[in-house]
Structures are given as C-alpha cells and as structure tokens.
Image: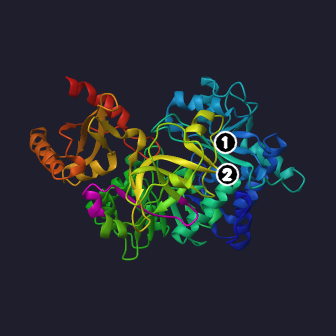
Amino acid sequence: MEVKANIAEYLPAMAARQPDATAILCPWGRRGGRLSFRELEERSTALARGLAAFGIGRGVRTVLMVPPGLDLFALAFALFKAGAVPVLVDPGIGLPHLKACLANSAPEAFIGVPKAQAARSLLGWARASLRITVTVGRRGWWGGLGIDDVLARGRAAPLRELGASGPDEVAAIVFTSGSTGPPKGVVYRHRNFSAQVEAIREAYAIEPGEINLPTFPLFALFDPALGMTTVVPEMDPTRPARVDPRKIIEPVVEHGVSIMFGSPALLDTVGRWGVAHGIRLPGLRRVISAGAPVAPAILERFQSLLGPGGAIHTPYGATEALPVATISSREILGETRAATACGAGTCVGQPVPSIDAAVIAISDEPVEGWREERRLGVGEIGEIVVSGPQVTREYFNAPRHDALAKITDGDAVRHRMGDVGYLDGQGRLWFCGRASQRVRMAAGTLFTEPCEAVFNTHPQVRRSALVGVGEPGSQLPVLCVELESGVRPWQRRRVRAELLALGACCEATRPITTVLFHPGFPVDIRHNAKIGRRALGAWAAPRVRG
C-alpha cells in the first residue's frame, strides 16, 4: 500500500480498489445503515464541498461530537478533505474538563448531534470562538445548519478540486482522556496519521477486505484507510466495562468479523460471559486491546474463545504516540507471564519498526535536549522516551506541557511517555507503571506494575493498586485490593494474610505490609481500565492514619 501525504487520500484509493465492498455497517439505530466504499467516498466529498462552502475549510478547527455510525465516518473524512481540523474530545471526561478543552482549542465550528448542540448552547461551550454550527439530526432552538443543508450545498457546488492539506499541516487535535493528569490537546499532522495507518497495517498484517468490530471510536476511523469493513457495535463507547456481551458476540458471528478492538475492561466482561456460556469465535483471528496492561488471566480467558489461529495483541502507546510496541497473547501466556508474576513488570513487546524506544533516568522536570548518553542499559528501570513518524510533536496551546513531555533532538522531537520501564536483552520493552505514580519511600522506590502483578496472582483478587500515602520520599506503600465477586467479608482476614505472604516472597513487594479492600476501583472513562490511583490514595490516607 502506498503511503499517503494526507490521511484523506486513503479513502478514494480504497473506493477505486473495492468500490462495492461495504465500508461501514451500522445495523442498529435511527441513522444506521450501510455505506460502500464508493458511497462513503461520494458522501464525504459532497459533505466536504458543502462544509467548505459554509466556511468550514482549510485550517478551521471544528469540534466533532457525533457517536459512532455512518455520519461520524463520512464527516471525519469530509473534514480531512476540506482541510479543516477536527477537534476530538471524549464526551465522558466530565463537563468541567470538556468546557476547558473546548475553551483551550478555540474552535470556530461545532458539528454535533442534538444532545451535544443543546449542551453546547446551554453551558456556553466555546461561545467566544464559535461562528458556525451543524446539527446531525433534528435541529432545535439553538439554530445553525443541518447536515442535510451541508449535503445539499455540497452536491450543488462546482466540481472543483478540494485543496488538499500537506503532510506537515495540522490534521486534528485529539484530547487525552485526562486519566493521569489534565486533558491535553494532541496536535496530529497528516504525516502522523499516515504513519499510524502504515504502522498498524504492518504490525497486524491487515489486508483490505477484513471486517472489524471497533469498540473505541477513534480507532475505528482508521478502518476505511486500511480497506476494512467497519461493523459498528451497539454500545456506549464511554462505558466498555458495562457492555452487554451479546451485543459484541452476536455481530462478530453474524457478520464474520475477523478483527476486533476492545479495552481490557471490555475483554474481561465479554470473556467472562463467553466462558460461562460456552461461546466459540473461530473466525475472530485478531483481537487488539489497549488502554492499560491486560492481565494474563483476562488474556487466557478470552483466548479460550478464539480458534487455533486466533490471538490477542496488546499494543503499547498513548494518544501522543501510537503504536510504540506490540506483543501477542501467545508470547505473554507462553513466556513473559511467569516473569510478570514474579515482579518483572509487564512485557509490552518489541518496538514497532518505525519507533526508536529509549529508557532514560527518571525526572519530574523538563529535559533539555537529547543526548545518546542519556540511554540507560539493559534491565535498568527508567523513563520511556520514543521517537518516530507517528510520534506527535506538540500539544495545542500548552507550552508548559510541551516543555515537560518533549525533548528536542535536532529537527526531531522525542516524546516522554510518562511511563517507567526497561528494555530487556532481546530488545523488548517492559512497562513498570506511570512515573507520577511511583511510591517513593525513605528506603527506596516502588513501581506500581511489578508490585501489583505479584498480588494479582491470588485467585480471589480481581485487581490491585499500589498507592503511596504521605510525602514523596517518606511515603507508606499501601496495597488497595478489589476482590472477585463472591468473596465474603469474613474471608478478608484470610485473603489479607495470604497476600502479605505472597508479598514477602518477592523482593520488590516485601516493603508492602498494609492492605486495604476497596469495593470498586475508580477507572478512566475512555477504556474503563486505567486505575485512578490518585483517588485511591486519597481514599486510603485517612484509613491508614486513622
């Protein structure tokens, strides 16, 4: 597949290659239906002409708040074709964060469903900068344009070439989830998106004609560029842990889905249900799971649903840099799982070919300029830093975050992932947790991922979280534990004793002597998988001091 300078160029190429193949299938909802690649190309082009005619053209920052479905895909590619800059904010991040993100990005246009338009108008989102609104669905008292107005104008517009944006122009602003800090607007240029498409295609050997069930909308937008059919699942993408497993399993079987994206929380929910009901999914060859490390028990459970050739792949990365590395369930369950259970951290695999991954000394301050001698040796835990064509260079209107997260390297930029880990003798990357969540005791430092994995081997532990109580440098390590359902309160004393015995057997976990049981961990809204350790630390502090 030829690398494109602009992400929008992939769609017409796929429409020419497989015009009648299904691009998007949304088998539910009032605005559901089917679009072939030719229809998606034609509809997105008409929308692009209409948007440009109404002033949403090159460089115009445009909020896009439309749920997964035919309209989302058509509008996303229309904005790329028009040269506009989609602003993508996860609606589940909470109203204060949402308002702050939109104020920071200062959009000139807002495309959204009626619910989003009503909230925008009532709550004053981006009121100072907005000049154009487009409603996808029935227009209400807030006024503005409707998507049918845009489509009609576009179809009547002269058939002139749309001004394609160059590879170094801004393609989109994608906000982080804010699960480990304030949400930040990541500036994607067209070359970043194109590099992502190629890296994903190469890493997972994706071929045009495959059928994907993506349960995370942003990942789904790559499907048409890769020539895949997208089957839109009926679910709330902001609550993957609460998905109805039947709404995932049934379309996988009915539509012959060969590849699926699901967060660790979704795989846990669907996997438990699938095992309980004897489900088999032999046609599902690749499952991709990201957002947080996937526990080996979750991998093993979901792997049992797949056929002999099926595997789960867990890419490592972030909104700012994706993919960085990847590993399959077969390698985890067959090899690295044992080391993880003994406190080695979680292996996230070999860096993809386009990425240079390095580990440097941990610092909470800006790092001025890259030098090769900053690299730590094999097995030394430090901060993970990456560079490559899919790595973004900056945040939008956030110089302080740029200073903390980016390291200049000549004309290039290296991104500090905010994670700690190390490289092993085979060049594989091992993840040891967030740098900001390390526990700094008077006697040394503990990292979350290696410690938690030791305790997670207990059969009655659903998950655990290490937090530090007190000031950094003299913190008390506290293990918060969420038990499996069915464990009775009177059994907790025994489980606590068994956990402390487990910890005493491993050097990394020996300093942990305080265990607290929590009814249900706070998690991020995007994947329902990242544990809210800051909130857990605040919860634990009075219980320890009391």
Way the structure is coloured = rainbow
Q: Is residue 76 above or below residue 64?
A: below
> Which residue is at the front of the view, 167 or 106?
167
In the picture provided, is 480 more to the left or to the right than 72?
A: left
Q: Secondary structure at mark 1?
A: loop
Q: Secondary structure at mark 2?
A: loop
Amino acid type indicated by mark 1: Val
CA distance for labels 2 and 1: 45 Å
Magenta part of the protein: which range?
337-356
**Which quarter of the figure is the N terminus placed in?**
bottom right
Nearer the camera: disc 2 or disc 1: 2
Amino acid type indicated by mark 2: Gly
Identified at 52% across, 47% down, the residue is: 416
Residue to which mark 1 is pinned = 136
Q: Is residue 229 at least partly visible in the picture?
A: no
Residue to which mark 2 is pinned = 410
